[in-house]
Image (spheres, rainbow, N blue to C red):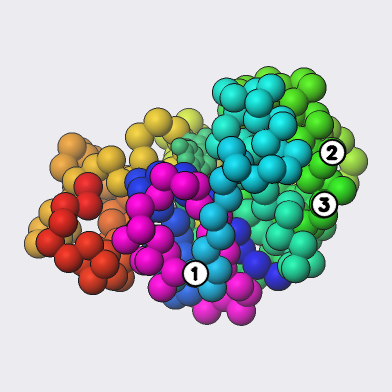
């Protein structure tokens, strides 16, 4: 059994490093697997190998498998095909996929008691699940079917979440045990859209998801004052500052690993 993430760029690789460290810090007993694309630089791969048990290059373009064919028909869905490669990890009986922009706040190994496909509701359209955190069973058969759906019908949102919701279309109604509590995929956006609920339940959050255009690595952080540039004081007084937590973990546990690999080269 393994936690699986994906990074196709050096920036998303930073997210994957922080995510991996957060899983380790909370003593997961599962393996950690990072799927990477060919554009991830060698030093970033080396750092990922220090944090993850396995770093697997997934190059859809020269894979020669059905994903390559599907990719030819739908070049717009490149990263999506890479994410679907998780289903080919058949040496694991069960996996939990986590976006590289998620951060773990406590041990979540109990997720492996759930079945495929378990996920939390999407904050924007709760009859759809959010594909930032989900439980799945690797299977070449499922992988093939997913690729067929992908190349024949495309994705209604242009990404993996659309495909996965079309494929696992009975998620909303069939089996309530496949609905993960929202605290396993707390989108930062929900804090603002329903603040009273966040005040009531937010302290139980187990996974934060920095969903949306601006990612934690897009900010700049001052390690001396432990503050972020461009963040208002009000926002940080209002709730536990997950962004700051991400940066604290990055600067305390990831930065030194990156310095070992990058030396004096700039890495951002
Ligand atoms: N991803 C990636 N490279 C990209 C875009 C996305 O590796 O250029 C991966 C990464 O794991 C990311 C996930 O796909 O977390 C989903 O994308 P993102 O988190 O940006 O979408 P959002 O959660 O904001 O909808
Ligand atoms: Mn995400």
Of badges 1 and 3, nearer the viewer stands 3
79 in relation to 179, above or below: above
Instruction: Provide residue 113's location: percent of width, then percent of height.
Output: 77, 67
Name the spot of residue 8 as percent of width and height, x first: 46, 45
Q: In the image shown, does 147 or 193 lie closer to the viewer?
A: 147
Q: Does the magenta-highlighted stretch encompass residue 181?
A: no
Name the mark on residue 140. Answer: 3
- Residues under labels 3 and 2: Cα distance? 9 Å
Secondary structure beneath label 2: helix
Label 2 with label 1: CB-CB less than 8 Å: no
Mark 3 crowd level (few <14, some 14–19, many ≥20, 10 Å Cα): some
Residue, far left? 224
* Residue 154 placement, left or right of 189: right
Label 3 residue SS:
helix
Task: Tell me: is circle 3 under 8 Å from ligand 1.
Answer: no
**Mark with earlier residue (2, 1):** 1
Above or below, comparing residue 24 to residue 201 in the picture:
below
Residue 182 in view (yes/no): no
Label 1 Cα neighbours within 10 Å, binned few <14 / some 14-19 / many ≥20:
many
Q: CA distance from mark 2 to mark 1?
A: 29 Å
Res. 145 mark:
2
215 vs 145, nearest the viewer = 145
Report the residue marked by disc 1.
Answer: 52
Q: Earlier in the sequence, mark 3 or mark 2?
A: 3
Find residue 146 and report its horizontal and vertical position in percent. 79, 38
């Amino acid at each position: 059994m393994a936690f699986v993430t994906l990074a196709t760029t050096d920036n998303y690789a930073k997210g994957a490093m922080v995510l991996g460290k957060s899983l380790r810090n909370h003593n997961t007993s599962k393996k950690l697997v990072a799927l990477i694309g060919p554009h991830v630089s060698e030093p970033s791969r080396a750092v990922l190998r220090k944090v993850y048990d396995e770093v697997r290059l997934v190059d859809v373009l020269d894979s020669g498998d059905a994903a390559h064919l599907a990719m030819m028909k739908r070049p717009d869905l490149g990263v999506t095909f890479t994410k679907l490669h998780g289903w080919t990890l058949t040496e694991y009986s069960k996996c939990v996929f986590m976006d590289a922009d998620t951060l773990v706040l406590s041990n979540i190994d109990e997720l492996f008691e759930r079945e495929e496909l378990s996920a939390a509701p999407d904050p924007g359209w709760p009859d759809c699940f959010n594909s930032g955190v989900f439980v799945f069973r690797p299977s070449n058969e499922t992988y093939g079917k997913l690729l067929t759906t992908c190349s024949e019908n495309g994705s209604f949102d242009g990404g993996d979440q659309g495909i996965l919701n079309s494929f696992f279309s009975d998620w909303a109604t069939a089996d309530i045990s496949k609905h993960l509590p929202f605290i396993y995929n707390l989108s930062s956006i929900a804090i603002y859209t329903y603040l009273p609920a966040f005040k009531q339940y937010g302290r139980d959050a187990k996974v934060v998801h920095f969903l949306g255009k601006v990612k934690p690595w897009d900010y700049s952080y001052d390690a001396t004052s432990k503050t972020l540039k461009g963040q208002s004081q009000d926002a940080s007084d209002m709730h536990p500052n997950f962004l700051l937590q991400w940066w604290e973990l990055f600067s305390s546990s990831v930065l030194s690993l990156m310095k070992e690999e990058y030396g004096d080269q700039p890495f951002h």
